[in-house]
Image (cartoon, rainbow, N blue to C red):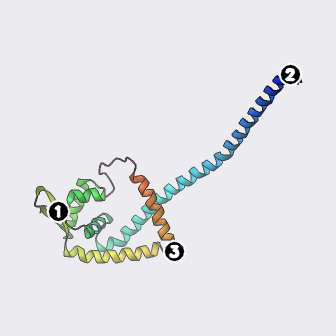
Amino acid sequence: MTLTTNPEAAQAAAATASTKATAAQKRRQTDAAKPDRDAKNRLDIKLGYLIHDVSRLRRKAFDEIVKPLGVTRAQWWIIAHLARHDGMVQTQLAQMLDVGKASLGALLDRLEATEFIERRPEPTDRRAKRVFLTKNSQQLLEKLVAAEAAFNATILANLTDKDRSELVRLLSTIKDSLSTMNLDDSGTGED
């Protein structure tokens, strides 16, 4: 190692050493932050899987609950929407449920065959049909609402009211974020 007696060279060497030390310190900070980022990414992935699994398991369990009533989850979903918007035009119902028109048509055919709904022509458009609940579906709806209430009481029993409110808030935030994305809206959603 050579000692430099030139003050400018010594100052330049000190500046270089300082720059190298700063760069090394930044690398260490970046390296230290990497595990935090990796942990966050793993947690986010776990959360995505958890949301998917809860949804899948809830659907599967609810299908078993309503099976004795002779209705599928998809049919129940239609009846529940019509309970709030009876007499909707079939295409509007497909948009609201985020399903294809053909898929909805097949579901409505089955519901009509079991006399849970009836389709009537739209007076202003001969091609369009309005969908209405029947008296049979009103009785079924009461049973379905009671079954869903008991089901929800069971699966949410370990959550406080505060927990439930917070969960609704958090899931609504995720839903809002997803709603703002430019997703393919071709109507190929699940039935």
Helix, strand or loop at disc 1? strand
**Nearer the observer, disc 3 or disc 2?**
2
Identify which residue is drawn at 73% across, 40% down.
25
Q: Is residue 62 left or right of residue 162?
A: left
* Residue 124 horizontal/vertical position (percent): 11, 58
Q: Disc 1 designates what residue?
A: 130
The residue nearer to you, when weighing 84 against 132, is: 84
Identify which residue is drawn at 31% across, 56% down.
98
The residue under label 1 is which amino acid type? Arg
* Residue 81 horizontal/vertical position (percent): 28, 66
Extreme residue in the front direction? 7
Q: Quadrant of residue 6?
A: top right
* Residue 125 horizontal/vertical position (percent): 11, 56
How many marks the image carries: the answer is 3
Sequence-first disc among 1 and 3: 1
Determine which of the numbered discs, if any, sits on residue 160 in the image.
Answer: 3
In the image, residue 21 sits, relative to residue 114, either above or below, namely above
- Whole-angstrom CA distance, mark 3 to mark 2, is 74 Å
